[in-house]
Image: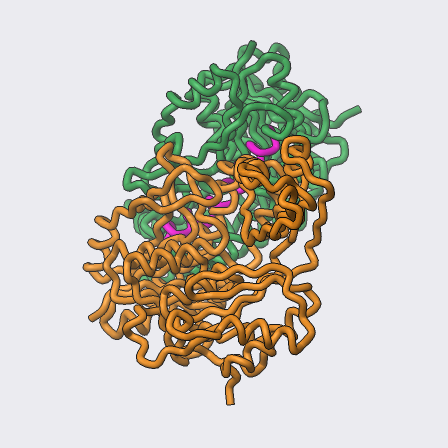
Chain colours: A orange, B green
């Protein structure tokens, strides 16, 4: 007997028929003698609709009320899921964030889970009841609903698996696992059998949309065995595991890309201490997420160019902040474009292999693709390129690192 | 300065634009120096959609989960309403049933409010904040969401007005008041300026859909001044008040009709003590609501016919219960039809006037309409007639009692 958490994303619970299918899948785990906690997202499209309404009311909406509104999507599916299980004779009960409670901090719309009280859930699961938990939501110290940011149901599932000491956490989605890259761009992309937490973390944060970044972080910290698999088929998915569980490690495991980038360059800012702070402190104050940063070598010893990237959704706001601080910063010209893509190669094998980044630069050069910005970490290399080269770059790199399926 | 509760029904909050309109209306009450609590329903059509999904999962669904699902509709509108108010600089905050809390009994899907803790709401209102309360919902003793039955937001509003000691409770809807009868059937129907609690209670329970019956009951018990008015215009609505506030009382104030009726007749049951119990006890056990009952005068002293009505939604189940108990009851034949309408005249003036019922019978007779069952109370007379005569009967009675507008 195992204790498992099964998480179903929006496409898996998109309508009543699909919810019934999910219930049958849950039943088969119960029939196999397992204790099951089910975590559900909102029906696909629902959260976007709710966010759209909030935006229509006011683009500067109050995050406290946003959370009240958008958390309702999961409330609907978790009730329907419990009903669907009951209707096929599986004892089940729904649980909302505030009922458990799943305690979070007060950062509305992007709250972090602090503690999950499992007393009642433990009791129910031990008695054979399936506990159906609304993903994406929790409760703040002041007794108001919080949500965990888009994709937050993954984090709910992993956090619940950790708190319940579950043997594994299965993330059911509309793809059958994690791929070496996006199969819509590279038909020869392969499903990865096992991937390390570290690699998955980079993949997720660099653009692969299969898991929320924070959920991977949490899985890594609590050593939760996560499996990404399809709700529409029975094939094995991708296991996210410790590095030592993977015998033969690829040098590069996957290639990610993100079009959610915009580039800003400040031409001829003073090359002096404190200049970076004068640029990036106001952006941080405005809650804008700066990603890649590159500072040119100063030619005259007096001035330099500063380039950085921000998410496209924060592009306009970032420009406003810079322009609002132009006197304080002091620059000759402000250049900007959202016509860029970040392409990244990821692999823990990089740690022990040399020449990995060089191969990336050479491959892109051969295709005539200009690299605008580079950033690296221990297990990834990211480059910013013109958006029109996205597919070409990803395909070329996929071949170059020997990832193509036979 | 007054303290008021403003309740907006589903058509008044049907989309974002309408919610913004409502917010402006609330703001004008705030600007006039009033303390305001807003109670909202779900967007029109939303609750039906949610109930439809539950039905699709299983017609025998668990009412606990039903409540989790359907209460989400009000959660969305209450959040949007608070946002809309904030966006026009009115301090506002949303409140769900469990947050206040609005404590109910554990009768899921038709719970009754037991207590409303107004500590926090009082504090907020005194500080000038508009409290936006999700209608229709509460919380059961076991910490699970309950709902108050269809139309329950009216009851939420009146209960809140009573608990907050509000000066009045305005029910905003898509009609501009309570009419002498349904204007879709009788173009000459008139809006009633003032109506007594007792009459409103009869009107609501006999088919007029403008207020939930229980909300009127609660208004009467707590002497809450209720006004029914339109969210789409500024004309005065209908005041529901104590009898002594109405100077000139009509004999008949309104005419209601309900097509939600079905008639069952047991032919030749034994005319002996206990026969009524043998028929109606099993129906009560099955939670079926029996309305009008008539027992024919026994011709032979041994057997009689028993006729009664049930809501159409419970018609089939009622027949099954009777058939399942046929041996115990003992009848010769079971007749049934759902081809009936109940038409009622209502007026507190009946208490002091004679001949009111006779005029009803004569008016219907003149039109050739056969009365199948009659039931009366102190302030109303109801008759069951064939459904095809509904409009004819209502129009004729409206004229006969002098209710037609000039």
- Magenta residues span B62-85
In the rendered image, the residue lying farthest to the front is: A300
Question: Measured from the top left, where is residue B349 in percent x and y?
Answer: 57, 19
Q: Is residue B275 left or right of residue B45?
A: left
Side of B125 where A297 appears, left or right: right
Residue B134 horizontal/vertical position (percent) = 49, 35
Q: Main secondary structure of the magenta part?
A: helix
Identify the residue shown where x is 51% and y is 32%.
Answer: B154
Viewer-proximal residue among A172 and B204: A172
Residue B89 included in the magenta stretch of the image: no
Above or below: residue B222 compared with residue B133: above
Q: Is residue B150 visible?
A: yes
Q: Is residue A268 above or below residue A236?
A: above
The residue lying at 54 percent from left, 63 percent from top is A382
* Closer to us: A108 or B35: A108
Residue A359 lies in what quarter of the image? bottom right
Residue B297 visible in the shown view: no
* Residue sitting at x 32%, y 76%: A246
Q: Residue drawn at (28%, 41%), measured in percent from left and top? A: B142
Q: Whole-percent x and y of residue B406?
A: 80, 24
């Amino acid at each position: 007997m195992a204790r498992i958490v099964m998480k179903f994303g929006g496409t898996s619970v998109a309508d009543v028929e699909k919810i019934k299918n999910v219930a049958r899948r849950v039943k088969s785990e119960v029939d196999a003698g397992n204790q099951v906690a089910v975590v559900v997202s909102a029906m696909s499209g629902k959260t976007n609709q709710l966010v759209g309404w909030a935006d229509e009311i006011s683009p500067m909406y109050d995050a406290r009320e946003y959370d009240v509104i958008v958390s309702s999507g999961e409330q609907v599916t978790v009730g329907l899921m419990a009903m669907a299980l009951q209707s096929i004779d599986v004892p089940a009960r729904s649980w909302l964030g505030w009922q458990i409670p799943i305690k979070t901090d007060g950062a509305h719309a992007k709250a972090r889970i602090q503690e999950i009280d499992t007393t009642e859930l433990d009791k129910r699961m031990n008695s054979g009841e399936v506990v159906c938990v609304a993903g994406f939501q929790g409760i703040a110290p002041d007794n108001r609903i919080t949500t965990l940011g888009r994709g937050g149901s993954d984090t709910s599932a992993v956090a619940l698996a950790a708190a319940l000491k579950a043997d594994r956490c299965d993330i059911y989605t509309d793809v059958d696992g994690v791929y070496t890259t996006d199969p819509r761009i590279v038909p020869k992309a392969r499903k990865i059998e096992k991937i390390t937490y570290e690699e998955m973390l980079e993949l997720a944060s660099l653009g692969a949309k299969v898991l929320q970044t924070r959920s991977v972080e949490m899985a890594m910290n609590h050593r939760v065995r996560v499996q990404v698999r399809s709700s529409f088929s029975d094939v094995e998915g991708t296991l996210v595991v410790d590095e030592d569980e993977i015998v033969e490690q690829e040098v590069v495991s996957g290639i990610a890309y993100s079009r959610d980038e915009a580039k800003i360059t400040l031409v001829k800012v003073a090359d002096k201490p404190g200049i970076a702070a004068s640029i990036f402190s106001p952006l941080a104050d405005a809650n804008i997420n700066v990603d890649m940063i590159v500072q040119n070598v100063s030619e005259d010893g007096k001035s330099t160019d500063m380039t950085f990237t921000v998410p496209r959704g924060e592009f306009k706001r970032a420009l406003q902040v810079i322009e609002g601080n132009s006197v304080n910063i002091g620059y000759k010209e402000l250049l900007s474009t959202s016509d860029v893509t970040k392409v990244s190669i990821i692999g823990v094998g990089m740690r022990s292999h040399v020449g990995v980044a060089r191969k990336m630069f050479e491959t892109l050069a051969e295709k005539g693709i200009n690299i605008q910005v580079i950033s690296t970490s221990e297990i990834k290399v990211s480059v910013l390129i013109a958006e029109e080269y996205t597919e070409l770059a990803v395909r070329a790199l996929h071949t170059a690192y020997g990832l193509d399926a036979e």
